[in-house]
């Protein structure tokens, strides 16, 4: 092995330009595949995070209108949902978290001299997990005591907190909502959100459902939020929701228009499939670029074998074994591939870390595009591909070199 390495170094010194161009081709191919897969992984994570930012693997259930007659009831009846329906759904096997949502647009807000309007929801504490509305440090979400004791407390989005309390800490501050005093108990952490339900969560006010009903006297909810315990049984839980509510409201459980369901479980699954497909496409493009570099290595090794025909003949004539001849050619091809590949990987890693460290600010495009991730599976797969390319690029020229007839080789000009 030591002899083979010494011969490899000597060959590099005599053929500097050829070795440089070959390594550069591999470097460029490696850089391409790692960057494409890194940016693809970052895009996938951002898209999935944006999807989950609107809802965490749940069903958002709306009242609809029946499209079928059922048990003497005509079609075209409007179905309106209430908290009693939610109490019933809590008995469904497989249901984990639930919350109602009472919504109201144009709520008048005042904090000191600052006035604005916003969308407000009355909810249960489970809404925090269902809608991924987690509090920033120093605050909290609504809890069970707030709901039971009808406390006038509010959890607010980070954007509206900045508008209402510029340069101040919002938690603990007094807030007038439609002329009724509330206390801010928490501000939402900044999050990426791509799906919208009555606008972004950063611009809304959250209060206990019991307080909302007391203030506005709503009987019916805007929607019900239900999360299945096991996402693999999400379809079964959804069918059971139609069956249970169909029995209560007198509609056919097969009538899908009687209820509107925004299925976040299916949306997340489709998002992962689409972004996974994009990753595969980018990986194939990068792999083809790397394959072209491998063909370049193979061509160079064929040229090397041709140039060394007399030298190989002399070695064979003095007793060099076939494996030694093949080993030299294969090792040179593998080392060229790995050297260029490692340099390309280091450069790609530096670019990924540099781009990933750029602040996104309020630019959503930066959230998706300037968020590359270099993962170990990508790095290991790339090293494996490079090793395979080096072996293949060296094997066929090596086999040709090892099969050279010593007498014919010595005559070669």
Image (tube, grey):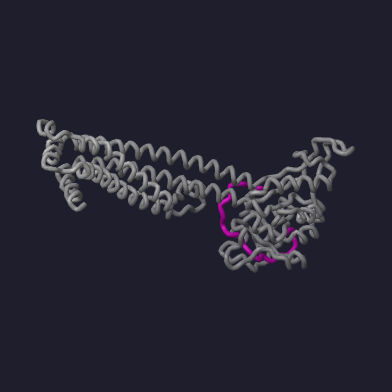
Placement of 329 over or under 152, stated as above or below? above
Q: Which residues are magenta?
A: 177-198
Residue closer to the observer: 119 or 411: 411
Residue closer to the observer: 2 or 28: 2
Residue closer to the observer: 190 or 405: 405
Residue 179: in magenta span: yes
* Residue at the extreme right of the image, as rendered: 72
Image spot of residue 370 (x, y percent): 45, 49
**Count of numbered tags:** 0
Placement of 76 over or under 352, stated as above or below? above
Image spot of residue 304 (x, y percent): 19, 37
Question: What residue sits 55% from the left and 42% below the top?
Answer: 273
Image spot of residue 7 (x, y percent): 17, 47
Residue closer to the observer: 280 or 112: 280
Question: What residue sits 12% from the left and 36% below the top?
Answer: 310
Residue 389: in magenta span: no
Q: Is residue 226 visible?
A: yes
């Amino acid at each position: 092995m030591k002899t083979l390495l010494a011969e490899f170094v000597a060959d590099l010194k005599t053929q500097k330009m050829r070795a440089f161009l070959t390594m550069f081709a591999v470097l460029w191919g490696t850089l391409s595949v790692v960057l494409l897969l890194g940016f693809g992984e970052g895009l996938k994570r951002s898209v999935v995070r944006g999807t989950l930012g609107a809802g965490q693997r749940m069903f958002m259930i709306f009242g609809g209108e029946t499209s079928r007659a059922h048990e003497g009831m005509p079609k075209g009846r409007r179905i309106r949902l209430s908290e009693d329906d939610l109490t019933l759904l809590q008995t469904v096997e497989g249901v984990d978290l639930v919350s109602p949502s009472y919504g109201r647009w144009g709520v008048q807000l005042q904090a000191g001299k600052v006035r604005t309007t916003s969308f407000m929801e009355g909810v249960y504490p489970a809404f925090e997990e269902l809608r991924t509305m987690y509090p920033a440090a120093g605050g909290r979400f609504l809890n069970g005591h707030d709901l039971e004791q009808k406390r006038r407390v509010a959890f607010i989005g980070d954007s509206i907190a900045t508008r209402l309390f510029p340069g101040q800490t919002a938690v603990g501050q007094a807030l007038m909502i439609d002329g009724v005093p509330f206390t801010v108990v928490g501000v939402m952490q900044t999050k990426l959100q791509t799906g919208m339900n009555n606008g972004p969560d950063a611009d809304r006010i959250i209060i206990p459902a019991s307080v909302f009903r007391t203030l506005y006297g709503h009987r019916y909810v805007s929607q019900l939020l239900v999360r299945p315990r096991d996402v693999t049984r999400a379809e079964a839980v959804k069918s059971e929701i139609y069956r249970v509510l169909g029995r209560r409201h007198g509609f056919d459980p097969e009538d899908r228009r009687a209820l509107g369901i925004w299925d976040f479980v299916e949306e997340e699954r489709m998002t992962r499939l689409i972004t996974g497909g994009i990753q595969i496409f980018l990986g194939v493009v990068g792999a083809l670029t790397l394959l072209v570099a491998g063909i370049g290595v193979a061509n160079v090794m064929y040229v090397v074998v041709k140039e060394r025909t007399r030298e190989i003949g002399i070695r064979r004539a003095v007793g060099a074994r076939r494996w030694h001849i093949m080993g030299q050619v294969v090792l040179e091809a593998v080392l060229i591939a790995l050297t260029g590949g490692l340099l390309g990987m280091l450069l790609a890693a530096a670019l990924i870390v540099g781009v990933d460290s750029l602040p996104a600010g309020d630019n959503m495009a930066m959230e998706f595009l300037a968020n590359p991730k270099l993962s170990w599976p990508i790095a290991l797969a790339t090293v494996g591909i490079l090793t395979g390319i080096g072996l293949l690029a060296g094997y066929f020229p090596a086999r040709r070199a090892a099969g050279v007839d010593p007498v014919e080789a010595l005559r070669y000009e």
